[in-house]
Image (cartoon, helix red, strand yellow):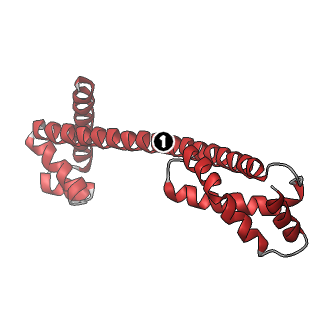
Amino acid sequence: MAEVDLLIRRVRAGEVEAFAEVVRQFERPVWRVVAAMLQGLEESRELMQQVFVDAYLHLDQYRLGEDFGAWVKAIARNRVRQELRRLSRESKKLAAYRELLERRLQDEAAADRHEQDYFDALEACRRRLPNQSARALSWRYAEGLSIEQIAARLETTRAAAEKLLSRARLALRECIESRLAEA
């Protein structure tokens, strides 16, 4: 005890190098405390360094004549508890992020399935249309022809071409809705 107190007095007097001897004397007992409370070796090493930094920074709070080993081990336990709380918060944040990401991926997968179901229904319903209606829709939406161009190809009036396209779109919509409702 007297030897440690002498070292502490030297450190407080400005002889910072004397603290290295304090660290050497107490690193094993502090290591046992830290390693017992933490699982990871790397985290334990980093925390060990922080414990002795904390001890150095708060050396003015150590009362000479008391058990320095108990004092520094208390710092170690407190530092480990802080680290465990931090890791717990971090773990909770990661779990919440994983859950959010999983939900988002499920939503995207569901949207993809819905979109695929829609396109499957569209294709099946398109095949059920009368040939003239299917051709008119293809000319309008696949080739981008105007109503006048479609009317010319069908050898009919603009109004008749519009009516044909309108009926074809309505038939497609009803068929698609029916198929999706069944699925």
Quarter of the image for residue 149 reads bottom left
Quadrant occupied by the C terminus: top left
Percent of width and height locating residue 143:
21, 60
In this rendering, the count of numbered labels is 1
Say whether residue 85 is left or right of residue 135: right
Residue at x 81% of width, y 74% of height: 16
Quarter of the image for residue 89 reads top right
Residue at x 43% of width, y 39% of height: 103
Element marked by disc 1: helix
Say whether residue 138 is left or right of residue 32: left
Q: Nearer the viewer, residue 61 or 141?
A: 61
- Furthest residue in direction top, as rendered: 182
Say whether residue 32 is left or right of residue 26: left
Residue at x 66% of width, y 44% of height: 81
| Location of residue 53 with respect to 97 vertically, above or below | below
Q: Nearer the viewer, residue 102 or 171?
A: 102
Quadrant occupied by the N terminus: bottom right
Q: Residues within 10 Å of mark 1 (few under 14, many from 20)?
A: few
Asked whether residue 15 is in view, the answer is: yes
User: What residue does disc 1 label?
Assistant: 100
- Furthest residue in direction left, as rendered: 131
Q: Nearer the viewer, residue 156 or 132?
A: 132
Q: Nearer the viewer, residue 98 or 116?
A: 98
Asked whether residue 58 is in view, the answer is: no
Percent of width and height locating residue 152:
17, 57
| Location of residue 167 with respect to 137 vertically, above or below | above
Percent of width and height locating residue 75:
74, 50
Amino acid bearing label 1? Leu
Percent of width and height locating residue 105:
38, 44
Residue at x 58% of width, y 44% of height: 37
